[in-house]
Image: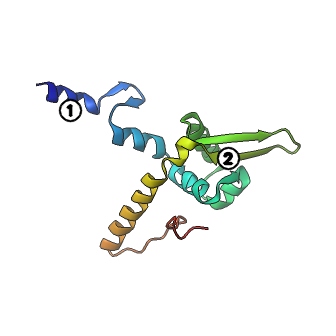
């Protein structure tokens, strides 16, 4: 009976945006539009300015990119460094916590590549395998 309680409560949301299910929690952190791509770019490039991220992710509007960066920062995955210069200079980098997501993203890339290959589809993505990255 106690196991039923644990299983039942595992994926119930404690609060509106918090879940106790590890998989749901991970997906909630990296599942937003462009979040995984932002993280991937910061893994491969270490530090990027907003304009560089815009060039790397041209389909993202400035508003959407800003929103996703704010959410990643609020979740502690990225650090936003503001420099007191004119014109304003802002750089984004991964926090230590953000760096811990690398093996998750690598596994997702490998799994997704295998899935696409099994479907007879070719990988068409701005992400490259991390061992192939710069």
x%, y% of residue 43? 58, 55
x%, y% of residue 46? 64, 54
**Which of 21/50 is in front?**
21
Q: Quadrant of residue 45?
A: bottom right
Asked if residue 84 shows in the view, the reply is: yes
Residue depicted at x 58% and y 52%: 38
Residue depicted at x 30% and y 72%: 118
State the quadrant of the N terminus: top left
Residue 18 lies left or right of residue 47; in this view the side is left
Placement of 46 over or under 119, stated as above or below = above
Q: Classify 10 Å Cα crowding around label 2: few (below 14), some (14-19), many (20 and above).
A: many
Residue 92 is tagged as: 2
Label 2 and label 1: CA atoms lie apart by 38 Å
Asked if residue 119 shows in the view, the reply is: no
Residue depicted at x 54% and y 45%: 98
| Residue denoted by label 1 | 7
State the quadrant of the C terminus: bottom right
Mark 1, secondary structure of its residue: helix
Q: Quadrant of residue 120?
A: bottom left
**Which of 113/1 is in front?**
1
x%, y% of residue 9? 25, 28
Q: How is the image coloured?
A: rainbow
Q: Earlier in the sequence, mark 2 or mark 1?
A: 1
Residue depicted at x 34% and y 31%: 20
x%, y% of residue 11? 29, 33
Residue 74 is tagged as: none
Mark 2, secondary structure of its residue: strand
Q: Classify 10 Å Cα crowding around label 1: few (below 14), some (14-19), many (20 and above).
A: few
């Amino acid at each position: 009976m106690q196991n039923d309680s644990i299983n039942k409560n595992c994926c119930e949301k404690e609060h509106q945006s918090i879940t106790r299910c590890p998989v749901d929690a991970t997906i909630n952190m990296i599942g937003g539009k462009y979040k995984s791509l932002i993280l991937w770019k910061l893994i491969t490039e270490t530090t990027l300015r907003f304009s560089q991220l815009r060039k790397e992710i041209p389909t993202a509007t400035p508003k959407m990119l800003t929103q996703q960066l704010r959410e990643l920062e609020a979740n502690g995955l990225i650090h936003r460094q503001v420099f007191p210069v004119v014109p304003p200079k802002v750089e984004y980098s991964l926090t230590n916590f953000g760096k811990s997501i690398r093996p998750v993203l690598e596994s997702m890339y490998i799994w997704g590549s295998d899935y696409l290959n099994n479907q007879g589809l070719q990988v068409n993505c701005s992400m490259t395998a991390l061992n192939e990255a710069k």
